[in-house]
Image (cartoon, rainbow, N blue to C red):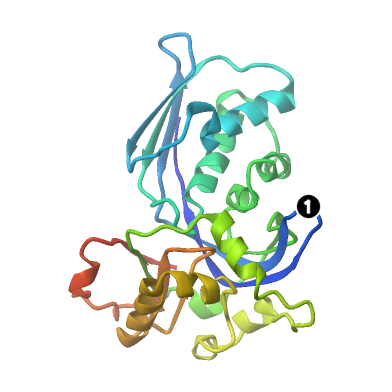
Amino acid sequence: MLRFTNSKINLGLSITGKLDNGYHTLNTVMYPIAWGDILEIVESITGQTTLTITGRTVDCPFEKNLVIKALRAIEEYIGQELPPIDIYLRKIVPDGAGLGGGSGDASAMLHLINKFANLNLSDNALAQLAASLGADCPFFIYDQPALATGIGTKITPIGIPAIEGKEILVVKPPVAVSTAQAYAGVDKYLDSNQLQPNIAEILHRPIAEWRDLLLNDFEKSVFAELPILADIKHTLYELGALYTSMSGSGSAIYGIFDPGTIPAKLPNQWDSYAQWIGRL
């Protein structure tokens, strides 16, 4: 049984507060893009559950991999171990990019196990399980544009006509930003009296108005640490992007273009960067 995963970009990201347990609350819109991994599960040929990863290197112990955590979450939910399976994960989406590659894999695993084992769990039930795995995971259960609030697990579908049919270029240089590092950096900029932007309202305006209104709160601290990301954002605008931003906590930067306007020749210094071009 095979599933092709998506990753996501964030259209605006506002940190709205910090809870006593250390978690941050936020307001963001997540949008699925087709830069994804490939996940397959089959009956085990050895009598043990195995995980084989190809493509991009993943430096993660077996039980800490989000795919295995998803399997264990379902087993705990149903109260029994599932028959052993062989899991094959082809990693394509870069890590440390703010694209939710691992979260997409975890949610894909929940979907696959649900069908493979004929559990008949609803998407809402899978989303609750996904929330225990990571803040981005419930979004990938539904895999449609959505406003995410709270710690990111409250998902409300949203339409964004302004970018339908547009093209996107995602650029990920060989630097990574850990989520913990990004949140630690943003804390010093938190202002409880700051007026929070209405991201959903901004997204219903023409895309030409987004540049000065639709902001990612992580950019200020992350760009200070990694100026290369600010350079990429600036260059994307020079190349004709209608709107460009860092995705999530970084380090991927995306640009949204009118169809057919992404230059065929990109800057030479990007030759070693991970890149993806697609349609929204």
Q: Looking at the image, which is closer to me, 237 or 220?
A: 220
Q: Residue at x 50, y 45 (%)?
A: 102
Answer whether residue 121 is visible to the viewer in this image. Answer: yes
Answer whether residue 145 is visible to the viewer in this image. Answer: no
Q: Looking at the image, which is closer to me, 241 or 15?
A: 15
Image check: 267 left or right of 208? left
Q: Is residue 24 above or below residue 189?
A: above
Q: Amino acid at mark 1?
A: Asn
Q: Residue at x 47, y 59 (%)?
A: 177
SS state under label 1: loop
Q: Position of residue 156 (x, y in %)?
A: 71, 62
Q: Position of residue 130 (x, y in %)?
A: 65, 42
Q: Residue at x 69, y 45 (%)?
A: 131
Residue under label 1, please give it.
21
Q: Looking at the image, which is closer to me, 129 or 15?
A: 15
Q: Is residue 91 above or below residue 279?
A: above
Q: Is residue 106 above or below residue 170?
A: above
